[in-house]
Image: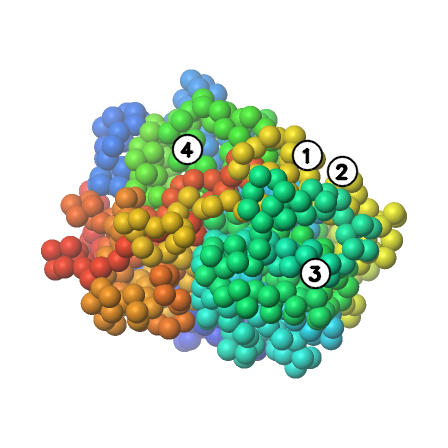
Amino acid sequence: MSKYISTHWGTYKVNQDKENNISLDYWEKDYYPTRFGLSLTEAATDHLRIKQPYIRKGWLKNKGKSDIDRGKDTFVPMSWDESLDIAANELLKTKNNFGNSSIYAGSYGWASAGRFHHAKSQVNRFFNHFGGFSSSYQSYSYAAAQTILPHIIGLDLYSTLDEHNSWNALSDNCELMVMFGGMPLKNSKVSSGGVGKHSTQEGMKKCVLGGTKFINISPLKNDSPEFLNAEHIAIRPNTDTALMLSLAYILIINNSYDKDFINKYTVGFDSFAAYVLGKKNNAPCTPEWASNITNIPIKKIKNLAEKLITKKTMISMSWSLQRASRGEQPLWMGITLACMIGQIGTAGGGFGFGYSAVNSTGDSFTKIPWKSLPQGKNNIKDFIPVARITDMLEKPGETFDYDGQKLKYPDIKLVYWAGGNPFHHHQDLNRLVKAWQHPNTIIVNEIWWNAQARHADIIFPANTALERNDLMLNPRDPTIVANKKSIDSFANSKSDYEIFSGLANRLGFESTFTDNKNEMEWIEFLWEESKKIAKDFKINLPDFKKFWENGFYEVPCPDKKKIMFENFRNDPENFPLKTPSGKIEISSDTIESFQLKDCLSHPSWFEPYEWLGKINKYTLHLISNQPTHRLHGQLDNASDSRKSKIKDREPVLINSLDANKRSIKDDDIVMLYNDRGKVLAGAILSEDVMPGVVVLSTGAWFDPNYNLNTEVHGNPNVLTNDVGTSSLGQGPTSHTTLIEIKKASKEEIADVMIFNSLSFKENT
């Protein structure tokens, strides 16, 4: 009977030879599998695995007082008993001396696709039993959207994603899909919680066969798959809102917008229209005005406006748009533009936020709220928006704005991180490294000697999904997978559950944390509880033993074509939105009451704090998009990602015009730099990126050379600015970054050391 492993990037068959060596193969039911996932087995056994607990030498010497050696120090190997005793004592001492709010327990949802070994659930359950912790809210992927969507359409982000028009509805009805930020197919290779069958490519192809035309509005031509044959409109980064405002201007001036839809389903249009026409002490949002901002010819803007209203049009916005200065605005404006076109609630039109961002968006599935690990209640109310970690560490007790509230940063003395990696996700990493020195203690559960491990005090070696049993039970995927343990735990590594159980034992609440269940008992509990939930959806899950033996179960999918806001459109009185007005809020009285200078009562144009419309010494705009050969920083140490490097560095795409001006050739090692830092990368000349823009994907493991004051591997977040989208959403603004680039001299180049197990010293 076959074994399977399900990950955020796909489900694979586990093969085992006569010597008990394992390898992964594609699951035959997944017609569009992810190649880089095959290298999980080699990453799970490579020389970068952490073999036993370690404690930083300087931390031991200073008895837990903060110092400035994190990232530069050596480590002392410890036994599990010693290290758990020390960590438990430090947790208890911090709680008794400073209170639970002084503990920040960080995690991130991409750590494991398993339902039980979901790192954030384990973290939350442990610390809630310990009395609570300061937490984070939002996701780096779409923080601004999470904050503003409830104000505009009355839905949280996840409900919005679940309700998107399905590909089978679009393929039969959509005539034009306008893609602000493109729809890069590589992004859809993943889904948080796990992927059974990849469906996005098939959905896109159905649309092409159905006659849908595509327009890719992006600085990158390859933000749209070739088979879409999309018209490409090159746009300056961060200026999509200006383009959309000018399209609204044309529709208003020509009296060609859908007034019936506006009057019946929206509020606040008149105030917005006054702004668009320049009646609020602002410039009118004319095509000429927008052309100067976006660098798109006036004629193209006018032609685009005509196409919008003569077709069944879907306004698609990528998640990347809102990871920028004033990132709330393009999303709000895109929804407003869709309102003016008037096709929201129909099969062929409306708006989308995240088609091809993850596999599940646009898929047909029955969303079932499967049972998750009970986490208890957090008694500590202190929290931060997730992208404000550095601010929190730098500014304890200071006040900050968030979604109309005045909040205070907690005074953090201890950080515990399990799952995720702030040295991948966060911005301005040089600033983070300095702030990371402030807490007294940093504890991590980590698999590999990556930057997070090397900047910690107490390191517990965690294991991979191949080394434990679990369930892939994703509410947004119709495949349930039995993740069966395929290899023994590497060296002395343990699961997060085992690590937290050991700590709970020393802190006096092991029985309440474990509920006296082992791993398989928890998994069977989750299955049995989910069977009860499934019955409410008229689905009869099989007996657990039968499911576990078979290896997977496919939840029946409905044939119904999903249409976002269909009920609202058909009957707005009985199906109002959960906004104050019950309608789509083009202008929001709630947001107006916050009296924010950087987010007004309606969609507006705000000049980005860095952009190509106002350049000085840094003349290129850096886009740090999602990588092709890994998920974020996961599997960067595996062969698929390693082979994509140029002279061991992450590749950077440069338009040939920009490269020629700087005497840069293919495969040159180049330096990207600004006031925040310096990064080395390998040059690739490409016409897929517009002049004035360079592309350095995220996920290269952070590898600073402190002697050269340079990150040598190609991590773009050394260069990105750690400033919130606005005082409303406080999301990350990684896509608002100006840099300069040059060919690196021999003196400026150092070897990449992050994949070298000897690049740090272990005291033995």
Residue type at tag 2: Pro
Res 374 quadrant in image: top right
Q: Alpha carbon of mark 3 to alpha carbon of mark 2: how far?
A: 31 Å
> CB atoms at circles 1 and 2 under 8 Å apart?
yes
| Comes first in the chain, label 2 or label 4 | 4
Q: Secondary structure at mark 1?
A: helix
Residue underneath mark 4: 391
**Residue sitting nearer the eye, 436 or 586:** 586
Q: Alpha carbon of mark 1 to alpha carbon of mark 3: how far?
A: 31 Å
Residue type at tag 1: Thr
Q: Secondary structure at mark 4?
A: helix
- The image position of residue 728, as x and y in percent, is 56, 37
Give the residue drawn at x 54%, y 78%. Answer: 229
Residue 568 appears anywhere in the view? yes
- The image position of residue 619, as x and y in percent, is 31, 55
Give me the disc on residue 580.
2
User: How many neighbours does mark 2 have within 10 angstroms: few (below 14), some (14-19), or many (20 or more)?
Assistant: some
Residue 328 appears anywhere in the view? no
| Comes first in the chain, label 4 or label 3 | 3
Residue underneath mark 1: 590
| Comes first in the chain, label 3 or label 2 | 3
| Comes first in the chain, label 1 or label 3 | 3
